[in-house]
Amino acid sequence: MGTPIQVPVQTYLSRDPRATSKRLVNCFSEQLDETSIVEPRQGYPLPPTSLRRAPGLTLEPYSWSAGMLGTGVRGMRTMAGVTYAVVGNSLVSIQDGGSFTTIAENGIPGSGLVRMADNTQCLVILVPSLSAAWTYCPNATTQPTFQALTAEGFAFYGAIDCWFVDSYIVFLATNGRTFFNDDGQVESGVNQITFNNGYTFSREFGTDNFVGGTVINRQITLFGALTTEGYLDAGNTTGSPFASVPAAFMQMGMHPDAAYSAANQNQTAFWLCNDRTIRCLSSNTAVRVSNSAIEMILETANLVGCYALTPTVGGHPWYVLTMPAEGRTLGYDCLTGAWFELESQGIGNWAPLCCYNAFGRQLVGDSIGTGIGYLDTTQTAEFVNPTNGEQRLVVMKFQTGPVYQGHNRMNHRRLELVVSAGQHETIGETPYVTLYVSDDGGTTWRAREMLSMGLQGQYQARCVWWNLGQARDRCYRFELSANTMAFTVDIQTEVEPCVW
Protein backbone atom coordinates (compact mmCIF):
# COMPACT_ATOMS: atom_id res chain seq x y z
CA MET A 1 0.00 0.00 0.00
CA GLY A 2 1.10 3.59 -0.53
CA THR A 3 2.70 5.28 2.46
CA PRO A 4 3.26 9.02 2.15
CA ILE A 5 6.57 10.41 3.38
CA GLN A 6 6.26 13.96 4.63
CA VAL A 7 8.06 16.29 2.26
CA PRO A 8 10.77 17.72 4.54
CA VAL A 9 9.96 21.31 5.43
CA GLN A 10 13.32 22.25 6.94
CA THR A 11 16.79 21.16 7.95
CA TYR A 12 16.49 19.29 11.23
CA LEU A 13 19.49 17.01 11.52
CA SER A 14 20.27 15.37 14.84
CA ARG A 15 23.70 14.22 15.93
CA ASP A 16 22.22 10.75 15.85
CA PRO A 17 20.55 10.82 12.41
CA ARG A 18 18.34 7.86 13.35
CA ALA A 19 16.34 10.34 15.42
CA THR A 20 15.92 12.79 12.56
CA SER A 21 17.93 13.36 9.41
CA LYS A 22 15.93 15.91 7.45
CA ARG A 23 17.91 18.38 5.34
CA LEU A 24 17.12 21.02 2.75
CA VAL A 25 20.16 22.20 0.78
CA ASN A 26 19.70 24.87 -1.88
CA CYS A 27 15.95 24.58 -1.57
CA PHE A 28 13.27 25.91 0.75
CA SER A 29 9.73 24.95 1.67
CA GLU A 30 6.55 26.76 0.76
CA GLN A 31 3.16 25.98 2.25
CA LEU A 32 0.44 25.28 -0.28
CA ASP A 33 -3.18 26.27 -0.13
CA GLU A 34 -5.26 23.83 1.93
CA THR A 35 -7.31 22.95 -1.15
CA SER A 36 -4.23 21.99 -3.16
CA ILE A 37 -4.07 18.56 -4.79
CA VAL A 38 -1.76 17.35 -2.01
CA GLU A 39 -4.15 17.94 0.86
CA PRO A 40 -3.43 17.15 4.51
CA ARG A 41 -4.27 13.55 5.33
CA GLN A 42 -3.18 10.76 7.59
CA GLY A 43 0.58 10.73 7.70
CA TYR A 44 0.75 14.45 6.90
CA PRO A 45 0.74 16.27 10.25
CA LEU A 46 1.72 19.53 8.59
CA PRO A 47 -0.04 21.57 5.89
CA PRO A 48 0.74 20.50 2.30
CA THR A 49 4.20 21.66 1.29
CA SER A 50 6.22 22.06 -1.86
CA LEU A 51 9.96 22.49 -2.16
CA ARG A 52 11.37 25.26 -4.32
CA ARG A 53 14.88 25.41 -5.67
CA ALA A 54 17.04 28.19 -4.24
CA PRO A 55 17.60 31.03 -6.69
CA GLY A 56 20.51 31.21 -9.03
CA LEU A 57 21.99 34.41 -10.39
CA THR A 58 21.58 36.46 -13.51
CA LEU A 59 25.00 37.97 -14.13
CA GLU A 60 23.88 40.17 -17.01
CA PRO A 61 24.05 43.13 -17.07
CA TYR A 62 26.48 43.05 -14.13
CA SER A 63 28.84 40.42 -15.50
CA TRP A 64 31.65 42.87 -16.04
CA SER A 65 35.00 41.41 -15.08
CA ALA A 66 36.16 42.66 -11.73
CA GLY A 67 39.34 40.64 -11.98
CA MET A 68 41.32 43.72 -12.91
CA LEU A 69 40.36 45.22 -9.57
CA GLY A 70 41.12 42.19 -7.42
CA THR A 71 38.88 39.44 -6.18
CA GLY A 72 35.98 39.57 -3.77
CA VAL A 73 33.08 42.00 -3.79
CA ARG A 74 33.39 43.26 -0.23
CA GLY A 75 30.38 45.56 0.12
CA MET A 76 27.75 47.63 -1.67
CA ARG A 77 25.82 50.80 -0.86
CA THR A 78 23.58 53.29 -2.69
CA MET A 79 24.10 57.00 -1.99
CA ALA A 80 22.05 59.75 -3.65
CA GLY A 81 20.80 57.32 -6.28
CA VAL A 82 24.25 55.96 -7.21
CA THR A 83 25.26 52.41 -6.28
CA TYR A 84 28.84 51.83 -5.15
CA ALA A 85 30.79 48.63 -4.56
CA VAL A 86 34.15 47.78 -3.05
CA VAL A 87 35.70 45.20 -5.36
CA GLY A 88 39.03 43.87 -4.24
CA ASN A 89 40.88 47.01 -3.14
CA SER A 90 39.00 49.41 -5.40
CA LEU A 91 35.88 51.55 -5.11
CA VAL A 92 33.62 51.54 -8.16
CA SER A 93 30.21 52.92 -9.08
CA ILE A 94 27.74 50.69 -10.90
CA GLN A 95 25.16 51.78 -13.45
CA ASP A 96 21.86 49.98 -14.02
CA GLY A 97 22.93 49.15 -17.55
CA GLY A 98 25.83 47.15 -16.15
CA SER A 99 28.76 49.49 -16.81
CA PHE A 100 30.98 50.61 -13.95
CA THR A 101 33.38 53.42 -13.22
CA THR A 102 36.51 53.04 -11.13
CA ILE A 103 36.65 55.78 -8.51
CA ALA A 104 39.68 54.72 -6.49
CA GLU A 105 41.78 51.88 -7.85
CA ASN A 106 43.69 50.07 -5.12
CA GLY A 107 42.53 52.76 -2.73
CA ILE A 108 41.03 50.54 -0.01
CA PRO A 109 43.51 48.08 1.52
CA GLY A 110 42.70 44.97 3.49
CA SER A 111 40.53 42.00 2.60
CA GLY A 112 37.18 40.58 3.56
CA LEU A 113 33.97 42.46 4.13
CA VAL A 114 33.72 46.21 4.58
CA ARG A 115 31.00 48.15 6.39
CA MET A 116 29.48 51.12 4.57
CA ALA A 117 27.27 54.05 5.55
CA ASP A 118 26.41 57.44 4.04
CA ASN A 119 24.68 60.74 4.82
CA THR A 120 23.62 61.40 1.17
CA GLN A 121 26.79 63.46 0.54
CA CYS A 122 29.61 61.42 2.08
CA LEU A 123 30.10 57.67 1.67
CA VAL A 124 32.05 55.99 4.49
CA ILE A 125 33.88 52.72 3.85
CA LEU A 126 35.09 51.08 7.05
CA VAL A 127 37.59 48.20 6.96
CA PRO A 128 37.03 46.43 10.30
CA SER A 129 40.16 44.32 10.06
CA LEU A 130 42.25 47.52 9.95
CA SER A 131 40.01 49.72 12.11
CA ALA A 132 40.46 52.30 9.36
CA ALA A 133 38.05 54.11 7.05
CA TRP A 134 37.93 55.99 3.77
CA THR A 135 35.37 58.48 2.48
CA TYR A 136 34.07 59.44 -0.93
CA CYS A 137 32.32 62.81 -1.34
CA PRO A 138 31.54 63.27 -5.06
CA ASN A 139 30.49 66.91 -4.61
CA ALA A 140 33.26 67.98 -2.24
CA THR A 141 34.27 71.62 -2.62
CA THR A 142 37.18 72.01 -0.18
CA GLN A 143 38.74 68.53 -0.06
CA PRO A 144 39.65 65.60 -2.32
CA THR A 145 36.61 63.56 -3.25
CA PHE A 146 38.25 60.31 -2.05
CA GLN A 147 40.51 60.21 0.98
CA ALA A 148 41.35 58.37 4.17
CA LEU A 149 39.39 59.32 7.27
CA THR A 150 42.18 60.66 9.50
CA ALA A 151 40.23 62.99 11.78
CA GLU A 152 41.49 62.79 15.36
CA GLY A 153 37.99 62.07 16.64
CA PHE A 154 37.91 58.91 14.56
CA ALA A 155 41.55 57.86 14.80
CA PHE A 156 41.57 58.02 18.62
CA TYR A 157 38.86 55.36 18.98
CA GLY A 158 38.95 53.40 15.72
CA ALA A 159 35.83 51.46 14.78
CA ILE A 160 34.55 47.98 14.00
CA ASP A 161 31.18 49.00 12.54
CA CYS A 162 29.22 52.04 11.37
CA TRP A 163 25.63 53.07 10.61
CA PHE A 164 23.58 56.11 9.62
CA VAL A 165 21.10 57.46 12.19
CA ASP A 166 19.12 60.62 11.46
CA SER A 167 21.83 62.98 10.14
CA TYR A 168 24.77 61.26 11.86
CA ILE A 169 27.29 58.56 10.99
CA VAL A 170 27.64 56.45 14.14
CA PHE A 171 30.67 54.26 14.85
CA LEU A 172 31.17 51.41 17.33
CA ALA A 173 34.59 51.97 18.89
CA THR A 174 37.19 49.21 18.97
CA ASN A 175 37.47 49.48 22.77
CA GLY A 176 34.02 47.89 23.07
CA ARG A 177 32.93 50.46 25.62
CA THR A 178 31.96 53.43 23.46
CA PHE A 179 30.11 54.50 20.38
CA PHE A 180 30.62 57.91 18.83
CA ASN A 181 29.22 59.99 15.98
CA ASP A 182 30.33 62.70 13.61
CA ASP A 183 29.12 66.29 13.73
CA GLY A 184 26.22 65.52 11.44
CA GLN A 185 25.55 66.21 7.78
CA VAL A 186 24.27 69.70 8.56
CA GLU A 187 27.79 70.73 9.55
CA SER A 188 29.88 68.72 7.07
CA GLY A 189 27.64 69.56 4.11
CA VAL A 190 28.98 68.06 0.91
CA ASN A 191 32.47 67.46 2.32
CA GLN A 192 34.07 64.78 4.43
CA ILE A 193 32.48 64.16 7.81
CA THR A 194 34.00 66.00 10.78
CA PHE A 195 34.48 65.23 14.49
CA ASN A 196 35.07 68.70 15.93
CA ASN A 197 32.68 68.32 18.87
CA GLY A 198 33.69 64.87 20.10
CA TYR A 199 30.30 63.27 20.56
CA THR A 200 30.80 59.99 22.45
CA PHE A 201 28.53 57.79 24.54
CA SER A 202 29.75 55.05 26.87
CA ARG A 203 28.00 51.97 28.20
CA GLU A 204 25.60 52.72 31.02
CA PHE A 205 24.00 49.49 32.18
CA GLY A 206 26.47 46.71 31.46
CA THR A 207 30.10 45.94 32.30
CA ASP A 208 30.72 43.65 29.32
CA ASN A 209 32.20 45.04 26.11
CA PHE A 210 30.13 45.73 23.03
CA VAL A 211 30.65 43.12 20.30
CA GLY A 212 28.45 44.38 17.45
CA GLY A 213 25.19 46.09 16.71
CA THR A 214 22.57 47.30 14.28
CA VAL A 215 20.13 50.15 13.76
CA ILE A 216 16.46 49.25 13.43
CA ASN A 217 13.64 51.80 13.31
CA ARG A 218 16.09 54.57 14.29
CA GLN A 219 17.12 52.76 17.47
CA ILE A 220 20.77 51.86 17.90
CA THR A 221 20.97 48.37 19.38
CA LEU A 222 24.43 47.41 20.62
CA PHE A 223 25.08 43.84 21.68
CA GLY A 224 27.60 43.16 24.41
CA ALA A 225 29.18 39.82 25.18
CA LEU A 226 26.52 39.25 27.86
CA THR A 227 23.96 42.08 27.70
CA THR A 228 22.42 44.45 25.19
CA GLU A 229 21.61 48.18 25.31
CA GLY A 230 19.58 50.51 23.08
CA TYR A 231 19.92 54.21 22.23
CA LEU A 232 17.84 56.85 20.48
CA ASP A 233 18.51 60.34 19.12
CA ALA A 234 17.15 62.56 21.90
CA GLY A 235 18.05 65.81 20.16
CA ASN A 236 20.39 66.93 22.97
CA THR A 237 21.84 70.36 22.23
CA THR A 238 25.06 69.68 24.17
CA GLY A 239 27.15 66.53 24.29
CA SER A 240 26.00 63.42 22.51
CA PRO A 241 22.66 63.73 20.73
CA PHE A 242 21.87 60.18 21.82
CA ALA A 243 20.31 58.91 25.03
CA SER A 244 19.92 55.42 26.38
CA VAL A 245 16.61 53.54 26.26
CA PRO A 246 16.35 51.72 29.60
CA ALA A 247 13.56 49.45 28.34
CA ALA A 248 15.89 48.19 25.59
CA PHE A 249 18.32 46.60 28.04
CA MET A 250 18.41 42.79 27.75
CA GLN A 251 20.21 40.08 29.69
CA MET A 252 21.25 38.53 26.39
CA GLY A 253 24.26 39.43 24.30
CA MET A 254 26.15 38.44 21.16
CA HIS A 255 28.75 35.74 20.65
CA PRO A 256 32.18 37.43 20.62
CA ASP A 257 33.07 35.90 17.23
CA ALA A 258 29.79 36.98 15.62
CA ALA A 259 30.05 40.77 15.37
CA TYR A 260 28.58 40.78 11.85
CA SER A 261 25.81 38.27 12.49
CA ALA A 262 23.45 41.17 13.31
CA ALA A 263 21.19 42.02 10.37
CA ASN A 264 17.76 43.53 9.81
CA GLN A 265 15.00 41.54 8.13
CA ASN A 266 11.21 41.57 8.22
CA GLN A 267 11.14 44.74 10.34
CA THR A 268 13.27 43.32 13.12
CA ALA A 269 16.88 42.50 13.96
CA PHE A 270 18.41 39.00 14.03
CA TRP A 271 21.74 38.00 15.58
CA LEU A 272 23.77 35.08 16.90
CA CYS A 273 23.40 35.22 20.66
CA ASN A 274 26.11 34.58 23.25
CA ASP A 275 24.38 31.27 24.11
CA ARG A 276 24.82 30.14 20.47
CA THR A 277 21.18 30.51 19.59
CA ILE A 278 19.77 32.69 16.81
CA ARG A 279 17.43 35.33 18.16
CA CYS A 280 15.38 38.26 16.93
CA LEU A 281 14.07 41.38 18.60
CA SER A 282 10.41 41.56 19.53
CA SER A 283 9.56 44.67 21.57
CA ASN A 284 13.06 44.68 23.06
CA THR A 285 12.82 40.98 23.90
CA ALA A 286 15.30 38.40 22.55
CA VAL A 287 13.09 35.76 20.93
CA ARG A 288 14.70 32.42 20.02
CA VAL A 289 14.17 31.44 16.36
CA SER A 290 16.76 28.65 16.06
CA ASN A 291 15.64 25.11 16.81
CA SER A 292 17.44 22.36 18.72
CA ALA A 293 18.96 20.83 15.59
CA ILE A 294 20.34 24.16 14.35
CA GLU A 295 21.74 24.79 17.82
CA MET A 296 23.53 21.42 17.69
CA ILE A 297 25.34 22.75 14.61
CA LEU A 298 26.10 26.11 16.23
CA GLU A 299 27.23 24.50 19.49
CA THR A 300 30.46 23.18 17.99
CA ALA A 301 30.81 25.52 14.99
CA ASN A 302 33.84 27.73 14.41
CA LEU A 303 32.15 31.14 14.26
CA VAL A 304 35.22 33.25 13.43
CA GLY A 305 34.43 35.52 10.50
CA CYS A 306 30.73 34.66 10.30
CA TYR A 307 28.39 37.21 8.73
CA ALA A 308 24.70 37.57 7.89
CA LEU A 309 22.84 38.54 4.71
CA THR A 310 19.12 39.26 4.39
CA PRO A 311 17.76 38.67 0.87
CA THR A 312 14.07 38.17 0.12
CA VAL A 313 13.27 35.38 -2.36
CA GLY A 314 9.81 34.95 -3.87
CA GLY A 315 8.15 36.74 -0.96
CA HIS A 316 10.20 34.76 1.59
CA PRO A 317 12.31 37.08 3.80
CA TRP A 318 15.53 35.24 4.69
CA TYR A 319 18.12 35.61 7.40
CA VAL A 320 21.24 33.85 6.08
CA LEU A 321 24.24 33.17 8.35
CA THR A 322 27.47 32.15 6.64
CA MET A 323 30.28 30.56 8.66
CA PRO A 324 33.33 30.53 6.34
CA ALA A 325 35.58 28.80 8.89
CA GLU A 326 32.98 26.04 9.10
CA GLY A 327 32.26 25.96 5.35
CA ARG A 328 28.53 26.15 6.04
CA THR A 329 25.60 28.53 5.50
CA LEU A 330 22.33 28.32 7.44
CA GLY A 331 19.18 30.12 6.35
CA TYR A 332 16.02 31.04 8.25
CA ASP A 333 12.77 31.73 6.40
CA CYS A 334 10.81 34.42 8.25
CA LEU A 335 7.66 33.48 6.32
CA THR A 336 7.54 29.81 7.33
CA GLY A 337 9.81 29.76 10.37
CA ALA A 338 11.78 26.92 8.74
CA TRP A 339 15.55 26.46 8.42
CA PHE A 340 17.46 25.40 5.32
CA GLU A 341 21.02 25.40 4.00
CA LEU A 342 22.77 27.07 1.09
CA GLU A 343 26.02 26.00 -0.50
CA SER A 344 28.11 26.76 -3.57
CA GLN A 345 29.82 24.05 -5.57
CA GLY A 346 33.41 23.53 -4.51
CA ILE A 347 33.17 26.00 -1.60
CA GLY A 348 30.88 24.50 1.02
CA ASN A 349 29.26 27.69 2.24
CA TRP A 350 27.23 30.06 0.04
CA ALA A 351 29.54 32.23 -2.06
CA PRO A 352 28.02 35.76 -1.70
CA LEU A 353 29.80 38.08 0.72
CA CYS A 354 27.37 40.98 0.41
CA CYS A 355 23.77 41.54 -0.64
CA TYR A 356 22.15 44.87 -1.47
CA ASN A 357 18.85 45.98 -2.98
CA ALA A 358 19.52 48.25 -5.97
CA PHE A 359 17.91 48.90 -9.36
CA GLY A 360 14.83 47.05 -8.13
CA ARG A 361 16.91 43.88 -7.82
CA GLN A 362 18.79 42.08 -5.07
CA LEU A 363 22.44 42.32 -6.02
CA VAL A 364 24.96 39.92 -4.51
CA GLY A 365 28.73 40.03 -4.74
CA ASP A 366 31.03 37.03 -4.96
CA SER A 367 33.33 36.51 -1.97
CA ILE A 368 36.09 34.79 -3.92
CA GLY A 369 35.42 35.45 -7.60
CA THR A 370 34.93 38.34 -9.94
CA GLY A 371 31.46 39.66 -10.32
CA ILE A 372 28.08 40.90 -9.21
CA GLY A 373 24.75 39.34 -10.11
CA TYR A 374 21.20 39.48 -8.92
CA LEU A 375 19.13 36.72 -7.35
CA ASP A 376 16.83 35.11 -9.91
CA THR A 377 14.48 32.20 -9.18
CA THR A 378 14.36 31.36 -12.90
CA GLN A 379 18.09 30.59 -12.95
CA THR A 380 19.86 27.46 -11.72
CA ALA A 381 23.49 28.64 -11.73
CA GLU A 382 25.40 31.29 -9.79
CA PHE A 383 28.87 32.85 -9.99
CA VAL A 384 31.54 31.76 -12.44
CA ASN A 385 34.00 29.12 -11.27
CA PRO A 386 37.40 30.77 -11.82
CA THR A 387 39.06 27.42 -12.54
CA ASN A 388 37.00 26.61 -15.65
CA GLY A 389 35.18 29.83 -16.50
CA GLU A 390 31.74 28.22 -16.15
CA GLN A 391 28.90 29.21 -13.86
CA ARG A 392 28.58 27.03 -10.79
CA LEU A 393 25.33 25.05 -10.76
CA VAL A 394 22.97 25.37 -7.80
CA VAL A 395 22.59 21.70 -6.82
CA MET A 396 19.29 21.06 -5.05
CA LYS A 397 19.40 18.37 -2.33
CA PHE A 398 16.83 17.22 0.17
CA GLN A 399 16.56 14.19 2.39
CA THR A 400 13.73 12.67 4.37
CA GLY A 401 13.46 11.42 7.90
CA PRO A 402 13.59 7.65 8.47
CA VAL A 403 10.76 5.42 7.22
CA TYR A 404 10.27 3.71 10.54
CA GLN A 405 7.62 1.29 11.85
CA GLY A 406 8.49 0.01 15.31
CA HIS A 407 12.05 -0.78 14.17
CA ASN A 408 10.69 -3.69 12.17
CA ARG A 409 12.33 -4.70 8.91
CA MET A 410 10.25 -3.48 5.97
CA ASN A 411 10.25 -4.25 2.25
CA HIS A 412 10.48 -1.07 0.17
CA ARG A 413 8.65 -2.05 -3.03
CA ARG A 414 8.22 1.32 -4.68
CA LEU A 415 9.22 4.97 -4.29
CA GLU A 416 7.86 7.89 -6.30
CA LEU A 417 8.99 11.50 -6.26
CA VAL A 418 6.30 13.85 -7.52
CA VAL A 419 8.37 16.64 -9.03
CA SER A 420 8.05 19.12 -11.90
CA ALA A 421 8.42 17.32 -15.21
CA GLY A 422 8.98 18.49 -18.74
CA GLN A 423 10.32 21.89 -17.68
CA HIS A 424 13.87 21.52 -18.99
CA GLU A 425 14.92 24.51 -21.05
CA THR A 426 17.25 22.71 -23.46
CA ILE A 427 15.58 20.70 -26.22
CA GLY A 428 16.85 17.12 -26.39
CA GLU A 429 18.74 17.29 -23.10
CA THR A 430 17.53 15.03 -20.29
CA PRO A 431 17.43 16.30 -16.70
CA TYR A 432 17.98 13.66 -14.02
CA VAL A 433 17.23 13.11 -10.35
CA THR A 434 19.72 10.99 -8.41
CA LEU A 435 18.48 8.87 -5.50
CA TYR A 436 20.63 8.07 -2.47
CA VAL A 437 19.59 5.49 0.12
CA SER A 438 20.63 5.08 3.74
CA ASP A 439 19.71 2.00 5.77
CA ASP A 440 21.21 3.26 9.03
CA GLY A 441 19.02 6.29 9.54
CA GLY A 442 21.16 8.64 7.49
CA THR A 443 24.68 7.83 8.71
CA THR A 444 26.01 6.31 5.47
CA TRP A 445 24.63 6.56 1.94
CA ARG A 446 24.77 4.69 -1.34
CA ALA A 447 23.66 5.91 -4.73
CA ARG A 448 20.86 4.29 -6.72
CA GLU A 449 20.02 4.87 -10.36
CA MET A 450 19.31 8.29 -11.82
CA LEU A 451 15.86 8.85 -13.32
CA SER A 452 14.75 11.29 -15.96
CA MET A 453 12.52 14.24 -15.09
CA GLY A 454 11.29 14.26 -18.68
CA LEU A 455 12.44 16.01 -21.80
CA GLN A 456 11.08 19.45 -22.58
CA GLY A 457 7.30 19.15 -22.87
CA GLN A 458 7.02 15.70 -21.26
CA TYR A 459 4.82 16.98 -18.45
CA GLN A 460 3.53 13.53 -17.46
CA ALA A 461 6.98 12.03 -16.86
CA ARG A 462 7.30 10.26 -13.50
CA CYS A 463 10.22 9.41 -11.22
CA VAL A 464 9.53 5.92 -9.82
CA TRP A 465 12.07 3.52 -8.30
CA TRP A 466 11.19 -0.18 -7.77
CA ASN A 467 12.38 -2.97 -5.46
CA LEU A 468 14.59 -0.96 -3.15
CA GLY A 469 15.27 -3.74 -0.66
CA GLN A 470 14.74 -4.04 3.07
CA ALA A 471 15.51 -1.74 5.98
CA ARG A 472 14.47 -0.91 9.53
CA ASP A 473 14.95 2.86 9.32
CA ARG A 474 15.42 3.81 5.68
CA CYS A 475 16.16 7.42 4.66
CA TYR A 476 16.06 8.82 1.14
CA ARG A 477 18.03 11.68 -0.35
CA PHE A 478 17.36 13.28 -3.73
CA GLU A 479 19.80 15.42 -5.71
CA LEU A 480 18.99 17.52 -8.73
CA SER A 481 21.83 19.11 -10.64
CA ALA A 482 20.03 19.65 -13.95
CA ASN A 483 19.32 23.08 -15.42
CA THR A 484 15.59 22.89 -14.81
CA MET A 485 13.00 24.22 -12.42
CA ALA A 486 11.99 21.81 -9.68
CA PHE A 487 8.89 22.00 -7.52
CA THR A 488 8.55 18.90 -5.34
CA VAL A 489 5.06 18.33 -3.96
CA ASP A 490 4.90 14.71 -2.78
CA ILE A 491 6.91 11.59 -1.95
CA GLN A 492 5.17 8.20 -1.93
CA THR A 493 6.46 4.79 -0.89
CA GLU A 494 4.98 1.30 -0.92
CA VAL A 495 6.29 -0.71 2.02
CA GLU A 496 5.22 -3.93 3.66
CA PRO A 497 6.39 -5.93 6.67
CA CYS A 498 8.91 -8.67 6.05
CA VAL A 499 7.49 -12.15 6.48
CA TRP A 500 9.94 -14.67 7.91
Image (tube, grey):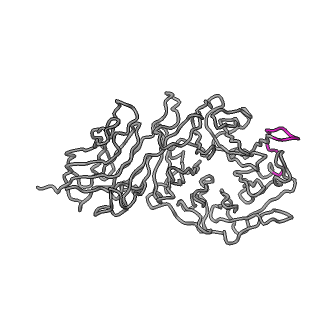
Residue projecting furthest to the left: 500
Q: Is residue 52 above or below residue 240?
A: above
Rendered location of residue 3, percent (x, y)? 24, 56
Residue 130, quarter of the rendered image:
top right
Q: In the figure, is residue 313 to the left or right of 163?
A: left
Instruction: Name the residue rendered at 80%, 59% in the picture.
Output: 200
Instruction: Name the residue rendered at 73%, 67% in the picture.
Output: 244
Rendered location of residue 455, percent (x, y)? 33, 35
Residue projecting furthest to the bottom: 247
For the residue pair 491 and 298, the one nearer the viewer reads as 491
Rendered location of residue 111, percent (x, y)? 65, 39
Q: Is residue 37 above or below residue 79?
A: below
Instruction: Name the residue rendered at 84%, 38% in the picture.
Output: 144
For the residue pair 302 and 171, the one nearer the viewer reads as 171
Would residue 146 be counted in the magenta stretch? Answer: yes
Instruction: Name the residue rendered at 38%, 53% in the picture.
Output: 50
Q: What stretch is highlighted in magenta?
A: 139-153
Q: Main secondary structure of the magenta part?
A: loop
The quarter of the image holding the N terminus is bottom left
Rendered location of residue 68, percent (x, y)? 65, 28
For the residue pair 164 and 361, the one nearer the viewer reads as 361
Would residue 71 be counted in the magenta stretch? Answer: no
Q: In the figure, is residue 47 to the left or right of 226?
A: left
For the residue pair 67 and 4, the one nearer the viewer reads as 4
